[in-house]
Amino acid sequence: MNMITHIVFFKLKDAHNVKKASEVLLGLKGKIPQLRHLEVGIDILHSDRSYDIALVTKFDSLEGMKAYQIHPVHEEVSKYMASVRESSVTVDYESG
């Protein structure tokens, strides 16, 4: 069965917020039924190309990912991340 993998990279306005932001993202775990996998990584290289945080999530279907995106817990986390991020990029793909 193919799953949907949703990856978001965040570049923060202030690097001092990395630990707090990663904890907020980890707070999604176990709170949204459609969320099958959640991983948060903090960049260790700090190169010119680096983003600060990677969020990797997995869902059973595109519909599951869409339900996650409008879930109230996700919306609260999104509001927080919007307040601390400088930019973000995302990739969504089917994985086997």
Image: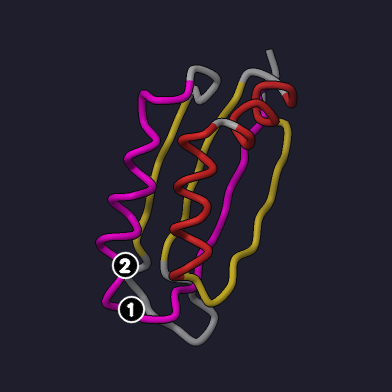
Q: Quadrant of the C terminus?
A: top right
Taking the image as shown, residue 93 lies to the left or right of residue 28, namely: right
Q: Is residue 32 above or below residue 55?
A: above
Image position of 54 (left or right of 27): right
Q: Give yes or no for contact between labels 1 and 2 (Cβ–Cβ under 8 Å).
A: yes
What are the residue bounds of the magenta stretch? Answer: 3-32
Q: Name above or below for residue 8 compared with residue 96.
A: below
Residue 69: horizontal and vertical position, in percent? 62, 37
Q: Residue furthest bottom?
A: 48
Which residue is labeled 2 in the image? 18
Residue 18 locus on image (x, y percent): 31, 67
In depth, the one of 90 and 96 nearer the eye is 90
The image quarter in which residue 94 lies = top right
Residue at the image point whose x is 33% and y is 78% from the top: 15
Q: Residue furthest top?
A: 1
> Which residue: 51% across, 39% down?
74
* SS at mark 2 in the image: helix
Three-letter code, disc 2: Val
Image point (66%, 22%), residue name: 64
Residue in front for this viewpoint, 88 or 37: 88
In three-dimensional space, the C-alpha distance between marks 1 and 2, rounded to whole angstroms, equals 6 Å
What crowding class fits label 1: few (fewer than 14 Cα within 10 Å), some (14-19), or many (20 or more)?
few
In this rendering, the answer to whether 75 lies above or below 52 is: above
Pick the front one: 80 or 50: 80
Measured from the top left, where is residue 10 in percent x and y? Answer: 51, 65
User: Residue 41 sits in which quadrant?
Assistant: bottom left
Task: Give whichever of 83, 40 is nearer the camera.
Answer: 83
User: Looking at the figure, which quarter contains the N terminus?
Assistant: top right
Residue position for label 1: 15
Position in image of residue 53 (x %, y %): 42, 62
Type of amino acid at the residue the image marks with label 1: Ala
